Amino acid sequence: MFINKNKSRRKLLLYFICLSSSLLFICYYSIINIFQPFIPKVRIRPERKDPFKKIFISHYTTTYGKRTDSKSKLFSNNLENICALLDPEEYPYANAVFVSLIDLVHLPTLPNTNESYRKKYQSQFWLLHTEESPRKSYETVQLNDITDLDDWFNLTATLKPESDIHIQYKGYRIKPEIISFLEKKLNKTYPRTNFSQFILKQDFFEKTNSSYMKTLANVLSHEINLRQDHYANACPYTCNTPLSNDLTVYLQPYLKPRNFQMKNRNIVYIAWFVSNCNTHSNREEYVSKLRSQKGIQIDVFGFCSSFFNSRRVSERCRKGIPNCTLDILTKYRFYLSFENSKCDTYITEKYWINGLNQHAVPIVLGASREQYKRIGVPYSYIHVDDYQSVEQLAEELHRLNQNDSEYMKYLQWTQLYDVGSDYMPTILYDIHSTLCFLGHYQRLYEMGKVNQESKYLLELIRYLFSIKNMTLKNFNWDTATTKIIKISDFYNPKVNCWDYDYPSIFKRIWNFFSIWTKLF
């Protein structure tokens, strides 16, 4: 009997070991597959006789792990007449190549030759795209030095306003009802964003036999009217331009006060949603010091809160729960909008989406005060750099907690401005349409020296970009050329960041026991 029991236990143990090993094996190879870097292998593209010579764009990399190829739908039906996507393996045949820096492993080379790929394909646009900080953008890139990326890219799309395409999570505009109110009270008219309907000069193309010219002209005509209508509706009195200080002061008596019901004004309630527990900005240490101040309570949500089961924070935001973050923030006076890096203009959804929730005032750390002032909604945040120490910040938070009229100054923007994705400096889909129109611009430029139709179309493309004031800083409209960008100056953590190296394993262990345990 005893022997049979031992045999049964051994069998169970053996089954358990086999099952555990199988699960570990599956998990290991799943992780390998998930994080396997994507490097396209060049494939010969068969020649095709297309009735219209489109501009081809290829994604050399994935974008946050997602493949973009000829089956992807990125263009409107109108733009599909003149633009097309190629598979990543066909990038040598593309007019423009899109590179997501966060997904890049290495740049292409030519086999069996010392010739540079970039030298052979000089006419291609290579656009560098990233929505991460310079600190985080290079995690997958195999480089000897960041200068290896110099003399390759001629267009950029980043969070920096100096980029050709300035990416921003959201933008803002003055509320139209505020403008109407000011016009009535001050007997003053503010200039509106007005466009007359664009009518194509059909007579330019009556005598031409070029289907290319006619097709491009019709697409441009439709796109111009579409963008004019969108911009006029989204930004009737311009976007991302604040009210003057004089007008803000003038409006104060007319703004509606908000009533705040608080059980205990001696405690400052702060929410923090955080999933990256060890950062270049060292935000976790700043939070630990802030939390140690008298009367400061910081409740932590997100992945980092799962280290310990906090009894104080009973709510959790799980995937698929709509408006969960917003519902939680309605119960707090302040919200920590702390970025993982301190880099030039690195301002993410932590401010634009969670921070501007209209309930909790965001306390920001990351980009400089000057950059928040230039990009952010006026008087919508508290910047940690405005205070010489954590103690001074804590004192200010207590002062605001006791004084509703002072606290309300940081929420008055909700009555003055609208915040939304329609007001961004550049809508994200414009990246691909921009590459497409620039490709056609270059093609037309070569024809424009002797052709009045192409000259007219060149003017239309330039006008198209002027609708939303897209300057494309690295593109020369007079010569239809770009300069090669020195990425080591433009997007370098040593140049564009002022924080710390990523914490070592010992520092992370120290953070775990000395900081995160104290946050619960």
Image (cartoon, helix red, strand yellow):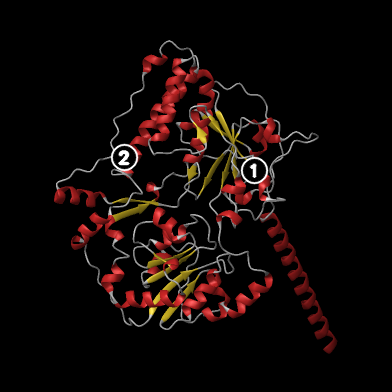
Q: Which residue does the image show at 37% across and 17% down from the upper left? A: 202
Q: Nearer the viewer, residue 319 or 101?
A: 101
Residue 195 visible to the viewer: yes
Where is residue 397 shown, x and y percent of the image? 37, 75
Q: Is residue 374 above or below residue 127?
A: below
Report the disc number at residue 150.
1
Residue at 49% x, 17% y is 211
Packing grade of label 1 (10 A; few <14, some 14-19, many >=20) is some
Q: Reading the chain from its start, which is encountered first: label 2 or label 1?
A: 1
Residue type, numbered disc 2: Ala
Give percent across and percent down for residue 73: 52, 39
The residue lying toward the viewer, choosing from 29 and 468, is: 468
Residue under numbered circle 2:
232
- Residue at (45, 66) in percent of width and height: 385
429 or 295, nearer to the observer: 295
Q: Residue at x 51, y 73 (%)?
A: 286
Which quarter of the figure has residue 121? top right
Q: Which mark is on residue 516?
A: none
